[in-house]
Image (cartoon, helix red, strand yellow):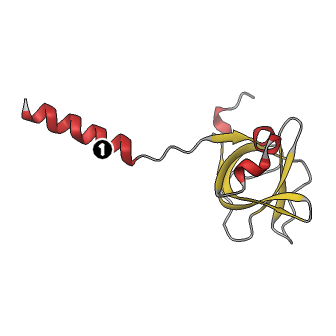
Amino acid sequence: MYVGAIMLGLLGLMFLSVDPQLQYTVDEVMDYPEDHDSGQVHVRGIVQIQSIDNSSSTFILEGIDSQIQVSFATIAVPDGFEEGRMIAVKGDLHQEDGVWNLDAHEIQTGCPSKYETE
């Protein structure tokens, strides 16, 4: 009985210590960007074709109707980062000269191409 109570207590502590972070689409963020500019946001979208600029370390992350300029100047990009690919970016959203930008802290790519159909 004591072991069960201890296990239940540990399970409860585990759930309290986990900080789930919601992942939003580009369109969800850009519908109300002011709601997301007070901290880190986790956004998924597609790297726009011909948008990667290695000289300025930026690219465009696009949704269906909206887009966000992403700066990756302070991080290393992972394998699989390429134009036209769905990715997720964690970073800080802010407005600069009327344009919303995301300063990336982490970029996550999707599944390896071995899972894609040929």
Local packing at callout 1 (Cα closer than 10 Å; few below 14, some 14-19, many 20+) is few
Q: Quadrant of residue 91?
A: bottom right
- Residue 28 is situated, as x and y percent measured from the top left of the image, at 76, 38
- Image quarter in which the N terminus is found: top left
Q: Is residue 30 left or right of residue 40?
A: right
Closer-to-camera residue (118/106): 106
Q: Is residue 39 left or right of residue 95?
A: left
- Residue 5 is situated, as x and y percent measured from the top left of the image, at 15, 34
Please indicate, yes or no, whether residue 84 appears anywhere in the rendered image.
yes
- Residue 24 is situated, as x and y percent measured from the top left of the image, at 69, 40
At a point 89% along the width and 37% down the height, the residue shown is: 65
Element type at mark 1: helix
Query: Which residue in the rendered view is the most extreme toward the left?
Result: 1
Please indicate, yes or no, whether residue 107 appears anywhere in the rendered image.
no
Closer-to-camera residue (98/105): 98
At a point 74% along the width and 70% down the height, the residue shown is: 73
Is 92 rendered above or below residue 88? Answer: below
- Image quarter in which the C terminus is found: top right
Is 85 rendered above or below residue 76? Answer: above
At a point 28% along the width and 38% down the height, the residue shown is: 11
- Residue 112 is situated, as x and y percent measured from the top left of the image, at 64, 41
Q: Quadrant of residue 85?
A: top right
Is 59 rendered above or below residue 61? Answer: below
Find disc 1 in the rendering and name its residue.
Answer: 13
Dot 1 amino acid type:
Leu
At a point 50% along the width and 43% down the height, the residue shown is: 20
